[in-house]
Amino acid sequence: MKAMILAAGLGTRFKPWTDLHPKALALVNGKSLLERNLIYLQSFGIKDVLVNVHHFADRIRDAIIIHDGWGSNIHISDESGEVLETGGGLKKAVSYFDQGPFVLMNADILTDLDLNAMMSFHSEKKPLVTLAVTNRRSSRYFLFDAKERLSGWRNIKTGEEIISIPGPALIEKAFSGIHVISPEIFPLIHQQGKFSIVDVYLELAGTHSILGFDHSGSKFVDVGRPESVAVAERLFV
């Protein structure tokens, strides 16, 4: 199995570090987020990894070369001209995923989610996409029905809501930034250029199976802001 780590973002929530560095190289107990996630993937046998780059792209390239990929076989998807967001970045990488399902994950999350269990769930249920989710509090939620199908999205701060599959008592789950994706999704993505993969999922959810994999109880930190580093350092040595 292959994986892609999304490391191209500007990291605006992580200022002032990201004024001079890419967020993927932010340190947690002396190890960068990128290194930790590569080692995390290796623990499940995944060593073929694509990393997209934009913000301080050369810094990420140099770190990968200096550390010999931290033991992984890394390819770079260069978005130096324009950051393409999650959907555009994935679509640009279509030629890399020439086999079966693959993992997509954000560079700025840390977790001990059992990825083997998530991949087994995906293999058994055979959805187009499996999304890692938990019951934690968030400002934005994916909405699922009783069969774990993605049915919509809600921003509780703004009140914005998108419903893909109408139904009673939709369940709010916070997204953890890890996806297992079947390559059959690529011909279904009509969006071009810069776009969010969430928009793709919400559009496809009404006609294709997109499921949630609940890993509540696992360690999880979204290292999106400088203050979250201290939380991450308590949980991940």
Image (spheres, helix red, strand yellow):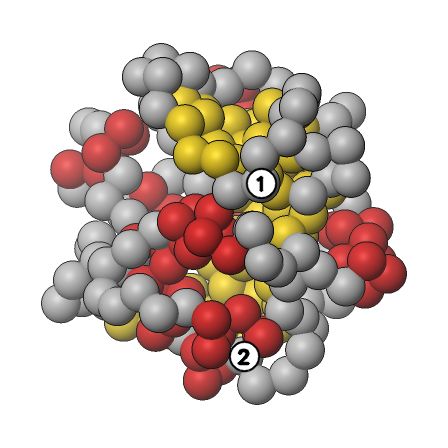
Position of 202 compared to 169: left or right?
left
Which image quadrant is residue 235 in?
Answer: top right
* Neighbours of disc 2 within 10 Å: few (<14), some (14-19), many (20+): some
Query: Residue sitting at 41 percent across and 75 percent down?
Result: 93
Q: Earlier in the sequence, mark 1 or mark 2?
A: 2
- Provide residue 176's location: percent of width, then percent of height: 57, 37
> Is residue 203 visible to the viewer in this orientation of the structure?
yes
Q: Amino acid at mark 1?
A: Ile
Image quadrant occupied by the N terminus:
bottom right
- Provide residue 89's location: percent of width, then percent of height: 34, 64
**Residue 202 to residue 119: above or below:** above
**Residue 115 to residue 172: above or below:** below
* Numbered badge on residue 215: none
User: What's the CA distance linking mark 1 and mark 2?
Assistant: 29 Å
> Is residue 44 visible to the viewer in this orientation of the structure?
no
Which image quadrant is residue 14 in?
Answer: top left
- Provide residue 20's location: percent of width, then percent of height: 17, 41
Query: Residue sitting at 47 percent across and 77 percent down?
Result: 187
Query: Residue sitting at 22 percent across and 66 percent down?
Result: 193
- Provide residue 90's location: percent of width, then percent of height: 41, 66
Q: Amino acid at mark 2?
A: Phe
Query: Residue sitting at 51 percent across and 56 percent down?
Result: 204
Residue placed most toward the observer, 162 or 88:
162
* Neighbours of disc 1 within 10 Å: few (<14), some (14-19), many (20+): some
* Numbered badge on residue 97: 2
Judging by the rendered image, the residue that carries numbered circle 1 is 165
Residue placed most toward the observer, 118 or 169:
169
Position of 99 compared to 197: left or right?
right
SS under mark 2: loop
